[in-house]
Image (cartoon, rainbow, N blue to C red):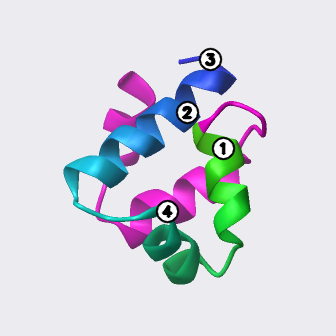
Amino acid sequence: MNDLDAGKIIKNIRKEKGLRQKDIAHAMTVEQSYISQVENGKTVPTPMFIKLFCLTFSVNEEQFHEK
């Protein structure tokens, strides 16, 4: 997985779970614009953000990195 793939993976997981960017942002206490930038490849999420995303939304972190 390269850095830009992380945003695509987050977007796919969000859609699979029927969530809006606003829902992700609220749960993770970040701005909705940050989620948008990550999903669109304009911002690379930090490893800590990915870890928190996986914990918050019950995503296996190893599987996240394999996608």
| Residue that badge 4 annotates | 21
- Mark 1 touches mark 2? (CB < 8 Å): yes
Quarter of the C terminus within the rendering: top left
Which numbered circle lies on residue 6?
Answer: 2
Please state which amino acid type lies under the numbered disc 1: Val
Q: CA distance from mark 2 to mark 4?
A: 15 Å
Please state which amino acid type lies under the numbered disc 3: Asn
Q: CA distance from mark 1 to mark 4?
A: 10 Å
4 vs 3, front mark: 4
Q: Quadrant of residue 20?
A: bottom left
Please state which amino acid type lies under the numbered disc 2: Ala
| Residue that badge 3 annotates | 2
Mark 1 or mark 2, earlier in chain: 2
Q: CA distance from mark 4 to mark 3?
A: 22 Å
Span colored in magenta: 40-67
Mark 1 or mark 3, earlier in chain: 3
Which numbered circle lies on residue 38?
Answer: 1
Mark 2 or mark 4, earlier in chain: 2
Q: CA distance from mark 1 to mark 2?
A: 8 Å
| Residue 38, placed above or below residue 27 | above
Q: CA distance from mark 2 to mark 3?
A: 7 Å
